[in-house]
Amino acid sequence: MWLPALHAGPGRCMLPRGIREDDGGAVGNMAKIELGSTLRVLEPYPGILAFYDGRIPGVRAWSDAPNWLDDGAFALGCASYAVIDGEEALVYDTHISLAHATLIRRRLEAAGVTRIRVVLSHWHDDHVAGNEVFADCEIIAHRLTLEALLANRAAIESADPPIRPLVLPNRTFEGSLSLEVGRLAVELHPADIHSHDGVVLLVPAHDLLLAGDTLEEPITYVAEPERLEAHLADLARMAGLPFRRILPNHGAEAVIAAGGYGRELITATELYVRRLLLCRAEPDLATRTLRDFAPDIFALPGISYFEPYEAVHAGNVAKVLARAGTVSAA
Ligand SMILES: [Zn+2]
């Protein structure tokens, strides 16, 4: 979810509860793991696999230095998905590394899949890092995703960790796109939420929405502060799609394993974004911790406080306020 330009930004170093930087070098001693070794494969619905990694206290996957993989994905928890029917699979995002993508591909092939296609939810690092593993497959993305990847290619390929070579989508679409995965119908819909190029995946047979980063639990990550009003409008539009459960790319493993979130995740996101916008007029609101900023969202079913999102929240508030300063100075 992190933009390349923000890799070294404030609030990047999210430490597990109880570990402080002055604890005798505890940060440098945090456990490292081999990339992919902690990947969990969940099956929230028959034929819907979730590849989940991260949210492991005291463990970083890439390095001690602030980086998009650890701080933007692994610390928060990160999932990608596959829709499978018979010998066909549609992979929704290629995960955070080539190692992860390789494990995903092996798992699908072991299940008898012979035709794999990929859909990208949006252009951010933690969703496209494994593309190279699927370079021989059809990689489908919104036209805006291809354009964003092209515009940011140099930054993505030199990020920490680098995504090099960045393998680009080879099929683009605009509007909505209907696909069949085996006998299963799925629909891709653009969703201008979190990122202007967002694409969500509807699986009508399961009343299910794969939401990418348009919905994130407990709070959204603000990547485009100047466009939050547009994101709110598309949240309302997306809520008109027919689904009952939601699987986001960043959320709680247990909830995803149990079938996902209810529509309360949309309510929570709307509440949070509206309150963020209020920070421009109410400075006291901007000083609150996440827990005190939005206690009402944690009263909603399925929405739980998760301490590493305090840093995301602090970054969100800073970006919204910086944007307000830009506007008033203009
Ligand atoms: Zn993300």
Image (spheres, helix red, strand yellow):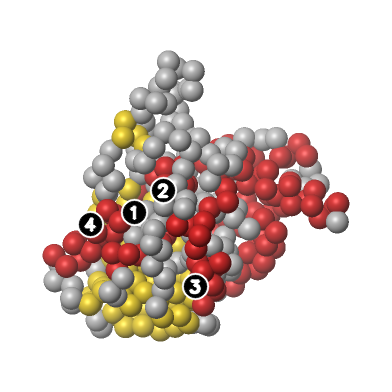
Question: Which residue type carries mark 4?
Answer: Leu
Between the C-alphas of marks 4 and 1, the distance is 10 Å
Q: Position of residue 87 (x, y in %)?
A: 18, 77
Packing grade of label 2 (10 A; few <14, some 14-19, many >=20) is: some
Let me know if residue 123 appears in the view: yes
The reply to whether dot 1 and dot 2 touch (C-beta < 8 Å) is yes
Q: Residue at x 59, y 72 (%)?
A: 237
The reply to whether dot 2 and dot 4 touch (C-beta < 8 Å) is no
In-front residue for pair 259/225: 225
Residue named by callout 3: 146
Q: Determine whether the residue tagged by mark 3 lies in a helix, strand or loop.
A: helix
The reply to whether dot 4 and dot 3 touch (C-beta < 8 Å) is no
Residue named by callout 2: 161
Between the C-alphas of marks 2 and 4, the distance is 19 Å
Question: Which residue type carries mark 3?
Answer: Leu
Looking at the image, residue 274 sits to the left or right of residue 99; the answer is right
Residue named by callout 1: 97
Q: Nearer the viewer, mark 2 or mark 4?
A: 2
Question: Which residue type carries mark 1?
Answer: Ser
Q: Earlier in the sequence, mark 3 or mark 2?
A: 3
Q: Residue at x 31, y 31 (%)?
A: 31
Packing grade of label 3 (10 A; few <14, some 14-19, many >=20) is: many
Q: Position of residue 205 (x, y in %)?
A: 33, 76
Q: Residue at x 28, y 74 (%)?
A: 136
Image quarter in which the C terminus is found: bottom right
Q: Residue at x 49, y 76 (%)?
A: 142
Q: Nearer the viewer, mark 1 or mark 2?
A: 2
